Image: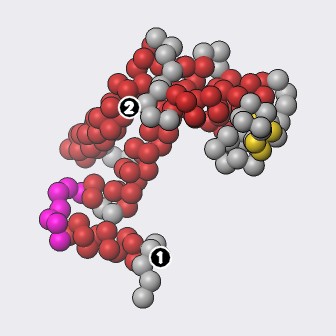
Amino acid sequence: MFRFDPLQWTVLLRRRLVTGLCAGAALLPSVLWLLPALTRRLAPTLRDQGDFFYPLKLYTADRLRSGQIPLWNPLSATGEPWLANGQSGPFYPPTLLFALPGAALAGGLYLLLHFAVLAWGAWRFLKELRLDRGPLSRDEAEAELFKWARDNGHLSG
């Protein structure tokens, strides 16, 4: 039988609010960086995004949109294998974002999705280390990290 406990409900709501605020804070720098892509349709160009990854994804999406499997890229020097190139990712599901009408928006959403997965993975990792229960001393944190590494096969001996 369900029993409503206002104190337990308040604790649960407070915990979810803090988790949500932390997730928002973790994604805020990426959203700010990608804001031009998301609002003004300007492609993200930091480091090798603009001259390597962005054109790579556009070419892959163009081939898929035309109904072809991108086996070869004739535009790169004298050509290069495309399906065998791990970075072209024609079968990687987020590549389908580049089928959206706005390529800059697709590039921004593609990166934002990866930032969100990164933030979620970091949160899961810290939760697995039991760091969600409050501040730990340095020794406690090192002990938790050691236990996680040992239990997950990252330490041998």
19 relative to 70 in the view: left or right: left
Q: Nearer the viewer, residue 103 or 136?
A: 103
Q: Which mark is residue 110?
A: none
Q: Is residue 145 magenta-colored?
A: no
Residue behind mark 2: 30
> Is the residue marked by circle 1 packed among few (<14), some (14-19), or many (20+) residues within 10 Å?
few
Looking at the image, the residue that sits furthest to the bottom is: 157
User: Closer to the observer: label 2 or label 1?
Assistant: 2
- Residue drawn 38% across the image and 51% down it: 122
Type of amino acid under label 1: Gly
Task: Check disc 2 and give the amino acid type.
Answer: Ser
Q: Secondary structure at mark 1?
A: loop
Q: Quadrant of residue 23?
A: top left
- Who's the residue at 57% across and 34% down the image? 52
Provide the residue span drawn in magenta.
133-139
Q: Left or right? Give the position of 69 relative to 16.
A: right
Quadrant where the image shows the C terminus: bottom left
Q: Residues within 10 Å of mark 2 (few under 14, many from 20)?
A: some
Residue 126 versus residue 45 in the image, above or below = below
Q: Which residue is mark 1?
A: 153
Q: Secondary structure at mark 2?
A: helix
Q: Residue at x 64, y 44 (%)?
A: 87
100, 129: nearer the viewer: 100
- Toward the viewer: 1 or 87? 87
Q: Residue 137 appears at what percent x and percent y?
A: 14, 65
**Of label 2 and label 1, which has the lower sequence position?**
2
